[in-house]
Amino acid sequence: MTRKQLVEQIQLKKSYLTVGLDTDITKIPKHLQSHPDAVFEFNKAIIDATKDLCVSYKINTAFYESQGLKGWEAMEKTVNYIPNEHLKIADAKRGDIGNTSSQYAKAFFETMNFDAITVAPYMGEDSIRPFLEYENKWTIVLGLTSNKGASDFEMLKIQNGSEAHLRSEFVYERVLTTVAKWGTEDNLMFVTGATQATEFENIRSIIPNHFLLVPGVGFQGGSLEDVSKYGMNKDCGLLVNASRAIIFASEKEDFAEEARAIAQQYQTEMAGYLS
C-alpha cells in the first residue's frame, strides 16, 4: 500500500484507527473456543464488524506463533481475509543480521500478504535495509514505546556532536534521526507510544512528515486527544492502535457488535480531530 492510498483511506473513512488483532485464544468468547478454527472465526467476525471504521489491522504475531502450525495457519487466513483497502501490519518486531532479516522480509512481504512489519533498530542499518528494499511496503521502526521498560534504554541520555559542540540527546532521538536517513516518508514509519504524549512535539520536530504507529490508547491509558493534538501532521500522519479495548469488549456472543460499538467511538472522536 502506498502513502497516497493510505491517506485516501483516512480521508474517506475519517479515521486513523488501527484494530489490533492480538487474539488470545484463552480470552475469546467461550462459545467459539471449541470451534476447530476458533481464532480465525473470531478474527473474521471482528473484521466484518469494524472494517468500515478503521484503516488498518495490526496482527501481533506472538499470539499466533505460540499456537504452532495451527496459529500460523490462522494468521495467514486472517491476513488474507482483511480487505486490500486496509494496511495490513505484522507486529513481529523483527531485526537481525542482513541475511536473516532478508528471510524475515520474504516471510512477511512475499510468503504472507502483509503491507508492513514492525522492526527493532538496535542492530543497525544492515538489520533494517532488507525490509526497505520492498516497493510499496512499510517498515515500522520502534522509536519510543509505551511500556515501562522504555526508560531502560530509549530514554537514556547520550552525547552527540563534536567535542566543541557536545549536546545530550535521548537514545530514541538518535534512533529517529538516524533511521529516517535510511528510508523515506513513503516506506518508513515509527512506533511511538500513546503514553509518551508529552514527547510528541519533540518527535514531530525530528520527523515532521513520517507516519507514526501509536499503541497505548485504551487499556494502557494513553490519550487519543493528546496524541492527535501533538502528533497529527498535514496528512494526519497517525495510525492509532486499539487492541483489547475493541476485540475483547464483550465475552459473550455479542462480541462483534460490542467491538463495533467501541471502534465507532474511536472513529467518531477521530473524525472530530480530522475536521
Image (tube, grey):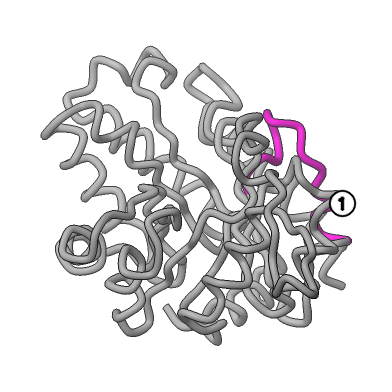
Which residue is painted at 39% across and 25% down in the image?
24
Q: Give the amino acid type for the residue marked by disc 1 in the picture.
A: Asp
- The quarter of the picture where the C terminus appears is bottom right
Closest to the observer: 93 or 85? 93
Which residue is painted at 37% across and 33% down in the image?
42
Magenta span main SS: loop
Magenta stretch bounds: 215-229
> Image check: 261 left or right of 222?
left
Which residue is painted at 68% across and 61% down in the image?
173
Secondary structure, mark 1, is helix
* Circle 1 residues within 10 Å: few <14, some 14–19, many ≥20: some
Eyeballing the image, is 228 above or below 236? above
> Image check: 164 left or right of 4?
right
Measured as percent of width and height from the top left, residue 19 is found at: 54, 48
Q: In the image as oriented, which residue stretches furthest toward the front?
A: 164
> Label 1 belongs to which residue?
226
Q: In which quarter of the view is residue 95 placed? A: bottom left
